[in-house]
Amino acid sequence: MHEGDDVMERRLRRDDLLKLAATGAVGLIASRSGLAEAARAQLAKESGRLQVLDWVGYEVKPLWAPYLQKYPGQKPKFTFMTNEANALAKMSAGLKPDVVRPYVGYVQDFAESGFVQPWNTKLIPNLKHLNPTMVKAGQYKGRQWGIPEDWGFDAILYRTDKVRPKANSWSLLFDDRYKGKIAWFDDLNQLVWAGYYLGFKKPYDQSDAQLKQSQNLLKSKKKLVRIFWSSETDMQSAFASGDIWIAYAWPADWVAMRGKHLKVAYMYPKEGALSWVGMLMLGKGTSRPEHAHAFANAWSSQQSGAWLEDNYGYGHSNTLARPKSKELVQALKLTNPGALAEPHAHIDRHIPRRALYARLWEEVKAS
Amino acid sequence: MTVHSPAAEAAPQPKRRRLRVDLTTPGLLGLPVTWLVVFFLCPLVFVGAYSIDALHGPSLFGETHKVTLAAWHDFFHSSVYLGLFWKSVKMSLVVSAIVVACAYPVAYYLALSGTKRKYVLLLVLIAPFLTSYLLRVLAWKVILGNRGVLNSFLFWTGARSRDHPITQLLYSRFAVILVLAYIWIPFVALPIFVSLESFDRRLLEAAGDLGSSRWQAFVRVTLPLSMPGVIAGFLFVFIPTVGEFVTPSLVGGTSGYMYGNQISDLFSTGFPDWQTGSVLALFLLGVVALLTAALTRFLQFRDVATG
């Protein structure tokens, strides 16, 4: 890894050395071990709770339990994001998380945003167990900006007792027969699946004309849609109560609805599901780098990965983690990270004109 | 021995009084004026700067850009944003009208029935305010949902089958209007109650003596005299609801999406577009200010006319 990435060394070389001189003066004079003790003392000064900007549902302890074992009683403080744009908006407004989780398509956006900094991979021992392709996906310009953790799909959840799809296609999200029973995700990615449905070659980088077509498709079909969900909890609540039967959803929603004894299926559209890998990123200028690295290492553990797979139905980048349920493995392709890539699915990627996509999506909502 | 003339003793008094007045006025006005400047005018200036791209993103100082009116131009040439604004205005007008129509009889009864318990009843009216706004809105989801209280009742009576609930109750424009009306009724009832209670009831007796029926007395005396309260109540509802975003986001669905939701999304959930968001916010502020000014003038005219 890059030498320049070494946050801990940098901390000790600069201003901290001055503090060490003051706080550990006696030790410094007495012996070289005094320097080490003073250094440890300084690092132990990382005070306050770790600030994590994450998605709802990821605040549960089993997903980062090893962190608590290392720092007993120091539960992180979670703030929630509804999507990456929302996280960027919060950080633009002044929130300074130590750790934030965008997905793989946003690695470049976040790296260039000035809100995050590369990790020191030496401080994440579990990194060696993570899927190398996913680890590489977290790199930008040769630095490790994202630590890959959870992975999964954006596809279609529907009630098998209420809905008879004409085809395994994104078109189920605007099937006239189910007007008022459909939910879309409140995210600019809706223009991406529309692009795949329309047969464009690069839906993540559509031309102006293509974007207009995708937007027009969404605008014309919006009347069939009951809700644009931004909170997964709200969507699940509406789905469970029967207000909606078809939803743009994630694997965890399929697991949750099965848990409520609903007859549901998770459809992978023939045009290709969208897929993603969650990337933990380190807040720029964090005052708790050691805690942040420990948190990422905890999330990267086999223990956390297995819990994620068993309980949320998401895959985990730790290659040692395996879910207990064979049904989950089959339905959600949990042991096959290759399912994330072409031609099975379209992995989330950088959108060069993301701001334009966002604007067009806002216009769809306002139309 | 010093001789004090009465004139000499009286002379300093006006000076002291003037000094006291000079200190009292800025003392009383200082805090609210400072508050307005710091928390209203300054933020408005910043929002204005964002709308013309003089400021960009989170940096208030040190990062300036070339001023452009592009966002304003796009806004006024966008049928989408203006259409959404008009939709919100219509929804808000409907809410305000419904609320005034519902609140007036309540306020009328409380003010003119002569009941000794009117203040207790008034307290009951505002009792829902003792609970959280969010809870009050969410409670409607329980009532209006497919398996909610209303639909369950219809299933129970056999009016609807379980497979065919009334789906338009929740996640619809109707839901937004209903919930907003419920929330704002006490806000309107209070000003109407105050205006009704304070007017001289001998006027009603005089109207009766001159041969007016109760209805005529209401139309020609009570209603005109209570108009200040009605208009104030109408504004109390219209101004906040036209920019409302919490209720629509919880019960509105796609059809109940309002102008306030768009502003909120542009600042938060959308890929941050503070420039467009600022334009939308300032336009809303401007329209509401103009409308308030116009109605206030009307209100004064009515006051003079009826006075």
Image (cartoon, coloured by chain):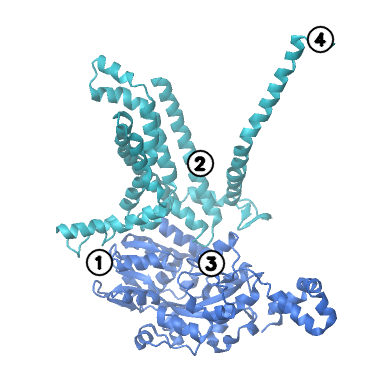
The residues bearing labels 3 and 2 have C-alpha atoms spaced at a distance of 32 Å
Q: Where does residue A130 sit, x and y in percent of width and height?
A: 54, 86
Q: Which residue is mark 2?
A: B286
The residues bearing labels 1 and 4 have C-alpha atoms spaced at a distance of 106 Å
Q: Chain of mark 3?
A: A
The residues bearing labels 1 and 2 have C-alpha atoms spaced at a distance of 43 Å
Q: Mark 1: which amino acid? A: Arg
The residues bearing labels 3 and 4 have C-alpha atoms spaced at a distance of 92 Å
Q: Are marks 3 and 4 on the same chain?
A: no
Q: Mark 2: which amino acid? A: Gly
Can I make out residue B64 in this image? no
Q: Colour of chain A?
A: blue
Q: Where does residue A151 sit, x and y in percent of width and height?
A: 47, 80
- Residue extending furthest left? B158
Q: Are marks 2 and 4 on the same chain?
A: yes
Q: Which numbered dot is residue B3?
A: 4
Name the residue at 47% across, 88% down: A321
Q: Which numbered dot is residue A177?
A: 1
Front of the two marks 1 and 3: 1
| Image quadrant occupied by the C terminus of chain A | bottom left
Name the residue at 58% across, 59% down: A93
